[in-house]
């Protein structure tokens, strides 16, 4: 029986290993983590992450060929294949701070593997890492190997949250990079055999290590670039009377462009896009490619611009002041069908409005008050550092935001409402009832283009929708300059 161990029981490690266990009954899969609380949750009825379909898969395999454990060293030493799926956050201090990937967690995992291994191992990079990380890891492993052979593979993960199980069951491609040596080819084949149990052979791509590592950063950069491109267009649409949805539809019909990932929004969020682009920028700078670095940096800059543009619209529409006004925030997760808030645009929008002294009432069907509290008090990039995950206590003072049990409670007596996540339930709300319970004039700021703006205007709302022709009210209120 092949034994697999995955270090890191997070958004990637948990679902990925659950699907491997489901599809490969003859493989024993152990998922280990330094966080005892996370492992406890994986072994309970309340899984640590919300992901459609995940619970069913875990319930089918847990205790049979899928195990979640805190005995990290035991499972690592017994495994034939070790996946490393730990955090690779943006550095918060020192050289490259704010850009470079912090490989502290990866390196400590590699040193531990070298320490406890007594038989040959295949070590698989599942985390997203800078190009050439495999070389560094190889050095750590071989210099501490005690005669054991380690083969390093790069097998980046392309799943998106909210659709992780679907993406894992039916991936566009699986990418495996390895050394172009007999040992490397043998290791690639061993991993390919695992995926081949359910992924068609023509979707399993092999490459050299550096191409595989770079492909992951490139894929995320290209995807994020599409969103920044359409978001840049949304600003021009608002200025000219064009409609960004119509523009997206028209350009997406070109088969060379394609229709996906062209939804204009308040900005992209999530744990990957910004982090991976900043990492790419840093690698370019380190290689003296300043023009290339600046090109990719712009994708993040446009994303920041989109978030502050949204805040400016809210403030300028409401007579240039939101001080003391209640504003409802509908949606805090970075996208629908997940409770994940890492780098969600809602954090920047809420902080922007709180900076202008608004009173926020926040509702999200999957995000807890504790999580929002952590997000609004943590400084940039701190969220992805496990040892620093202690919530910082916000400064004592007036409570200027709160969490509501549902959307109707959040909007009661509010001057405006902002839709920041495209949860399906926000499309189906009774907006007449909402209008009746709000202060007048009542504003809707739709950061995800989920409402029917024309219908809401009939009810009496003043509506701002990203990239859509402006409400006459907004035309008379030029956006404030930050
Ligand atoms: P995560 O924070 O959810 O999970 C990482 C886990 O690793 C944490 O539970 C942490 O406690 C654990 N960990 C850290 N150091 C450890 C160690 N030395 N030993 C044991 N456990 C340790 O992160 P994630 O979202 O699963 O991302 C993991 C990696 O995958 C990152 O490199 C990320 O960029 C990449 N990735 C993420 C996604 C995504 O959608 N979240 C998609 C593709 C790739
Ligand atoms: C992304 C990549 O899609 C995935 O391949 C990679 O493995 C991890 O990073 P994820 O961040 O989970 O996945 O979600 P994704 O669907 O890519 O959305 C990222 C952000 O972009 C979200 O905030 C989403 O709302 C936003 N987005 C997406 C848009 O604003 N417009 C779009 O058209 C698509």
Image (tube, grey):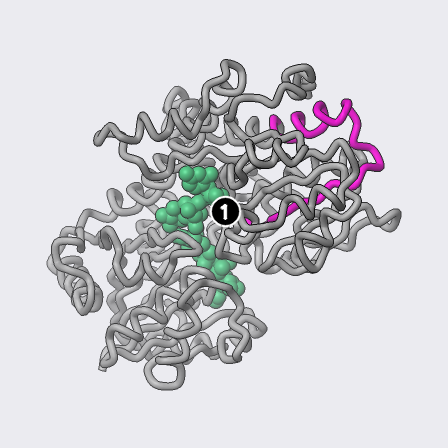
Span of residues in magenta: 309-334
- Is 28 left or right of 52, judged from the image as shown? left
| Figure check: 417 above or below 472 | below
Which part of the image, by quadrant, shows the C terminus?
top right
Q: Mark 1, residues whose alpha carbon is within 10 Å: few (<14), some, or many (≥20)?
A: some
| Figure check: 318 above or below 162 | above
Q: Is residue 375 magenta?
A: no
Q: Is residue 107 visible?
A: no
| Figure check: 202 above or below 303 | below
In the rendered image, residue 47, in percent from the top left (x then y), is placed at 51, 72
Q: Is residue 40 visible?
A: yes
Q: Report if the beta carbon of the residue with label 1 is closer than 8 angstroms to ligand 2.
A: yes
Label 1: element kind: loop
In the rendered image, residue 379, in percent from the top left (x then y), is placed at 67, 44
Residue found at x 53% / y 37% = 452
Which part of the image, by quadrant, shows the N terminus?
bottom left
Question: Which residue in the rendered view is the most extreme toward the right?
Answer: 397
Question: Which residue in the rendered view is the most extreme toward the front?
Answer: 458
Q: Is residue 323 magenta?
A: yes
In the rendered image, residue 209, in percent from the top left (x then y), is placed at 24, 48
| Figure check: 398 above or below 188 | above
Residue found at x 69% / y 17% = 477
Residue found at x 81% / y 37% = 325
Q: Nearer the viewer, residue 205 or 335?
A: 335
In the rendered image, residue 25, in percent from the top left (x then y), is placed at 25, 80
Q: Nearer the viewer, residue 210 or 220?
A: 220
- Is 216 left or right of 188, judged from the image as shown? right
Q: Which residue is mark 1?
A: 270
């Amino acid at each position: 029986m092949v034994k697999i161990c995955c270090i890191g029981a997070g958004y990637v490690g948990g679902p990925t290993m659950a699907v491997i266990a489901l599809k490969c009954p003859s493989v024993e899969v152990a998922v280990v983590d330094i966080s005892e609380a996370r492992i406890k949750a994986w072994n309970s009825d309340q899984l640590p992450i919300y992901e459609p379909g995940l619970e069913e898969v875990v319930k089918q395999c847990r205790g049979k060929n899928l195990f979640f454990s805190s005995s990290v060293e035991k499972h690592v030493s017994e495994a034939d294949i070790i996946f490393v799926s730990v955090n690779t956050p943006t550095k918060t201090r020192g050289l490259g701070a704010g850009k470079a990937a912090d490989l502290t967690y990866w390196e400590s995992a590699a040193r531990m593997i070298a320490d406890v291994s007594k038989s040959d191992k295949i070590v698989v990079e599942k985390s997203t890492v800078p190009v050439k990380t495999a070389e560094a890891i190889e050095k750590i492993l071989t210099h501490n190997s005690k005669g054991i052979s380690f083969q390093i593979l790069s097998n980046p993960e392309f799943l998106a949250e909210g659709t992780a199980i679907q993406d894992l069951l039916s991936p566009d491609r699986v990418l495996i990079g390895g050394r172009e040596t007999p040992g490397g080819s043998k290791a690639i084949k061993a991993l390919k055999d695992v995926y081949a149990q359910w992924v068609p052979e023509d979707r399993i791509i092999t490459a050299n290590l550096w191409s595989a590592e770079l492909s992951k950063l490139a894929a995320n950069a290209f995807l994020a670039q599409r969103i920044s491109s359409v978001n840049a267009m949304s600003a021009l649409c608002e200025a000219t009377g064009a409609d960004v949805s119509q523009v997206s539809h028209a350009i997406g019909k070109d088969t060379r462009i394609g229709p996906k990932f062209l939804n204009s929004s308040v900005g992209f969020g999530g744990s990957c896009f910004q982090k991976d682009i900043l990492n790419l920028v840093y690698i370019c700078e380190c290689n003296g490619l300043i023009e290339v670095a600046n090109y990719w940096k712009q994708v993040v800059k446009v994303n920041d611009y989109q978030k502050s543009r949204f805040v400016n619209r809210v403030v300028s529409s409401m007579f240039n002041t939101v001080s003391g006004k209640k504003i409802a925030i509908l949606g805090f997760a970075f996208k629908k069908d997940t409770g994940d808030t890492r780098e969600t645009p809602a954090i920047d929008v809420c902080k922007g409005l709180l900076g202008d002294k608004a009173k926020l009432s926040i509702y999200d069907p999957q995000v807890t008050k504790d999580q929002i509290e952590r997000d609004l008090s943590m400084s940039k990039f701190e969220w992805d550092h496990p040892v620093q995950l202690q919530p910082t206590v916000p400064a004592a003072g007036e409570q200027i935001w709160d969490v509501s049990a549902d959307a109707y409670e959040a909007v009661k007596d509010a001057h405006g409402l902002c839709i920041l996540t495209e949860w399906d339930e926000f499309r189906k709300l009774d907006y007449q009832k909402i209008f009746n319970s709000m202060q007048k004039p009542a504003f809707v700021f739709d950061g995800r283009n989920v409402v029917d703006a024309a219908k809401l205007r009939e009810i009496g709302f003043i509506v701002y929708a990203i990239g859509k022709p402006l409400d006459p009210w907004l035309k008379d209120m030029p956006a404030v300059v930050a």
